[in-house]
Amino acid sequence: IGRSFYNAYGVNDKIELEKKLNAIPGLEYQWLPEGSLEVITEPIPAVRFIDQQHNHGIYQWTFHNSVIAAFLGWKDCRNDRKKAVRFGNNDPMDEEILESIAKFMEEKKISYKWKKGDIFAINNRLVMHSRNSFTGARRVYASMFGDAMMKNEV
């Protein structure tokens, strides 16, 4: 669903991808007959404490929002959203619990009406975020992450 594995994992070929995937403890993957890739990620905590990111102290509890992204957004011929989210022992999560988390998120969301010239910056790892559907062209002028690099590091 979404991006290709080349883009998602920042690789140029299958060999480079497999090397990257094999280095992640607990991650499982397999190539399917039609050439697509099935990945079962390593168990990750739904709630985690972030104390450092890019050498900056943060000290904040955060919800790993990809749990709900998988439940609400993974709908295609290869993905069943009701089976996408599982506990660490591979038992499926109760659909009612996931629905209640999604409802809570919907009730607590803050929508921002953009005006010409607006810029919005968030910490992608700490802030649950999404976008609503819209009409018209989408223009992304820049997308950056990480700490600034010094000229001699470029």
Image (tube, rainbow, N blue to C red):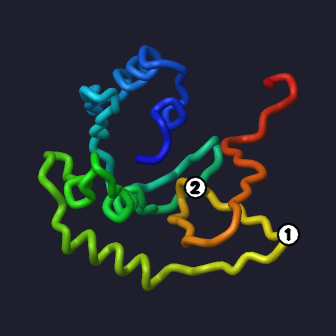
Q: Which residue is mark 2?
A: 124
Tally the marks: 2
Question: Is 106 displayed left or right of 144 in the figure?
Answer: left
Question: Is 146 displayed left or right of 103 in the figure?
Answer: right
Q: Which residue is mark 1?
A: 117
Q: Amino acid at mark 2?
A: Asn
Residue at x-position 54% and y-position 59% = 126
What crowding class fits label 2: few (fewer than 14 Cα within 10 Å), some (14-19), or many (20 or more)? Answer: few
Cβ atoms under marks 2 and 1 closer than 8 Å: no
Q: Quadrant of residue 66?
A: bottom left
Instruction: Name the secondary structure under disc 2.
Output: loop
**Sequence-wise, which precedes: disc 2 or disc 1?**
1
Question: Is 103 displayed left or right of 10 in the figure?
Answer: left
Instruction: Name the secondary structure under disc 1.
Output: loop
Q: Nearer the viewer, residue 135 or 1?
A: 135
Q: Nearer the viewer, residue 65 or 9?
A: 9
Q: Nearer the viewer, residue 108 or 69?
A: 69
Q: Is residue 72 above or below residue 9?
A: below
Residue at x-position 80% and y-position 25% = 154
In the image, farthest residue toward the top: 15
What crowding class fits label 1: few (fewer than 14 Cα within 10 Å), some (14-19), or many (20 or more)? Answer: few
Q: Is residue 87 above or below residue 101?
A: above
In the image, farthest residue toward the bottom: 107
